[in-house]
Amino acid sequence: MKRFITKELYKNDKKTYFTTTLLKWDKETNQRKMPWKGEKDPYKIWLSEIILQQTRVEQGWAYYEKFLKTFPTVQKLSKAKDEKVFKMWEGLGYYSRCKNLLTTARTITNKYKGNFPTKYEEIVGLKGVGPYTAAAIASFAYNLPYAVLDGNVMRVLSRYFGINIAVDTSEGKKRFQEIANDCMAADKAGLYNQSIMDFGATVCKPLQPICQECPLQKNCVAFNNDTISQLPYKEKKISKKERWFYFLVIDFNNKVYVRKRIEKDVWQNLFEYVSIEISSPEDVTSFLKSSLYKRVMGKQKGELIVISRWYKQQLSHQTIHGRFLTIKVKNPILSLTDFLLLNKRSVKKIPFPRLINSWHEDGNKDNVLF
Ligand code: SF4
């Protein structure tokens, strides 16, 4: 695809029109409601931004309120037990972000004596806070002139100015950051950032943007050149990996074996039952004959109680499929040295990945009997 950004397209009056129209749209038309909108408390802004990295606004809203109710200040969050916070995070995914949330809360409490840093450089230095979140905090809380840049913002800019530099390359991100900085109303940084975020989410949407009601339409290059579907331009295609797991829910004396996943892989820091990864979705009969299964069970036969259907969880770069086998054993399993044996009440208190929770939520209702 040929690049079609030119100096002529990206000229000053076009920028001015973009910025003033966006602010006018925000004042007169924008009705997007969010509990943290207009918020000046950097702790609340930070919390909302970290939660929103994970999820849609509708879902994130409930998490935000729950977190704020339990941890009304950064100090309270910093003193919380890891497991309690992980449990509350359950359903949001990307647990490394939850871990960073705790690390940052503790850094603010210890290094900054409980006061959220006020300089952009300090904010962006906090664990788990990237340039986007730092710009949002700096501009919303302190009105500092830092422009936010994410997929929404790049989409709006690429379409309006007709820029087809690839948004998924470092060169593209750098160029879009320059344009975003250029377009920002420096004296209304918070308002401007909020406007472009809302505009990207509600008007210039990824699919079916509402061009007929768009106040930028007359100057929008993509609209006028009929290139909306080609923008923003991406160079790389994401290939998704498929993975299959059997989860053995091994019941010994009404307790089950669980362990914390510590490997640098999906679901780090979350708990799981005995998991065995297989290369393809093999049926239960073949799986029970496999050396992988026998290696876990040793000499024990075990009584197979229930077989679940296949469950699926979509992650950003992989699709995980999981099937649960509930097995009763009469003796402890010797191979499971790094596992805990927990009763049901304790199991309910620990955080699991969404895929395992989907099976918990089904309450074994739809499991397929062997
Ligand atoms: S006219 Fe359409 S494509 Fe252009 S900025 Fe507006 S909503 Fe986006």
Image: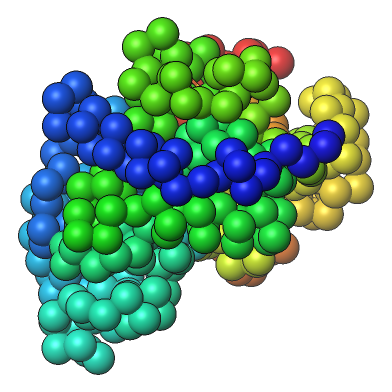
Residue 203 on image: x %, y %: 38, 22
**Side (left or right) of 349 relative to 91:** left
In-front residue for pair 229/306: 229
Indicate how the structure is coloured in the image.
rainbow
Classify 53 as above or below 366: below
- Placement of the N terminus among the 4 image quadrants: top right
Outermost residue toward the top in this view: 212
Residue at (83% x, 54% y) in the render: 295
**Side (left or right) of 86 relative to 360:** left
Residue at (21% x, 32% y) in the render: 24
Please tell me in which quadrant of the rendered image residue 306 appears: top right
Classify 160 as above or below 128: above
In-front residue for pair 331/198: 198
Classify 124 as above or below 332: below
Please tell me in which quadrant of the rendered image residue 70 appears: bottom left
Tally of marks:
0
Residue 161 on image: x %, y %: 55, 37
- Placement of the C terminus among the 4 image quadrants: top right
Residue at (12% x, 47% y) in the render: 38
Can residue 338 be seen from the camera position used here? Answer: yes
Residue 26 on image: x %, y %: 21, 32
**Side (left or right) of 343 relative to 333:** left
Residue 82 on image: x %, y %: 32, 67
Classify 171 as above or below 301: below
Residue at (67% x, 44% y) in the render: 6
Can residue 300 be seen from the camera position used here? Answer: no
